[in-house]
């Protein structure tokens, strides 16, 4: 083998080892710890009313958020690729914002905006429509 080919194999081995350590090892530990007490105990855990409610809520969020993200994402990407318009760079910056901002900051901002004492708190206070600690808030956070 040539030295260049050996370096390439060494690089591949290093990358695969890194992926194994960072991804496969933690998932393996989680799966092992989950099923360590046995399948019966695992079934008892996931068949509780709280677990079933959480699963139903997660599926409902998926049913709402995925089509909305697909609709907004495809239409916005077509708009950005096919058209040159004023404010295009601002729209791109807004779209890149979730990659740069911590989820904790986003959560605090959503509470500051939609909470009962927030800027749009009148929706909850006057209209009685709960946003931030209800399904609409979860949809907003998931879409972001």
Image (spheres, rainbow, N blue to C red):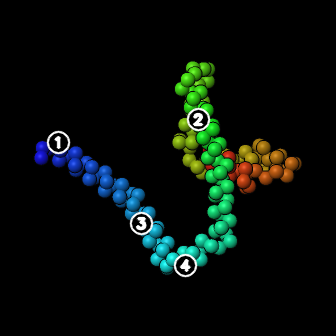
Q: Toward the viewer: 67 or 86?
A: 67
**Residue position marked by numbered label 4 in the rendering:** 41
Going from N to C along the chain, the mark reached first, 4 or 2, is 4
Q: Nearer the viewer, mark 3 or mark 2?
A: 2
Left or right side of 139 for 73: left
Q: Quadrant of residue 56?
A: bottom right
Q: Nearer the viewer, mark 1 or mark 2?
A: 2
**Residue position marked by numbered label 1 in the rendering:** 4
- The residue sitting at 60% across, 20% down in the picture is 85
Distance Cα–Cα, label 1 vs label 2: 43 Å
Q: Nearer the viewer, mark 1 or mark 4?
A: 4
Disc marking residue 28: 3
Going from N to C along the chain, the mark reached first, 1 or 3, is 1
* Whether label 1 touches label 4, CB < 8 Å: no
Q: Quadrant of residue 41?
A: bottom right
Disc marking residue 74: 2
């Amino acid at each position: 083998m040539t030295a260049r080919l050996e370096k390439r194999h060494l690089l591949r081995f290093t990358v695969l080892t890194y992926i194994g350590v960072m991804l496969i090892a933690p998932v393996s530990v989680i799966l092992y710890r989950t099923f360590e007490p046995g399948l019966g105990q695992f079934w008892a855990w996931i068949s509780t009313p709280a677990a079933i409610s959480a699963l139903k809520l997660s599926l409902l969020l998926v049913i709402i958020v995925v089509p909305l993200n697909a609709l907004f994402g495809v239409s916005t990407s077509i708009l950005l690729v096919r058209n040159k318009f004023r404010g295009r760079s601002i729209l791109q910056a807004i779209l890149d914002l979730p990659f740069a901002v911590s989820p904790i900051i986003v959560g605090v901002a959503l509470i500051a905006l939609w909470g009962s004492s927030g800027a749009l708190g009148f929706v909850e206070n006057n209209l009685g429509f709960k946003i931030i600690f209800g399904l609409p808030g979860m949809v907003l956070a998931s879409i972001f």
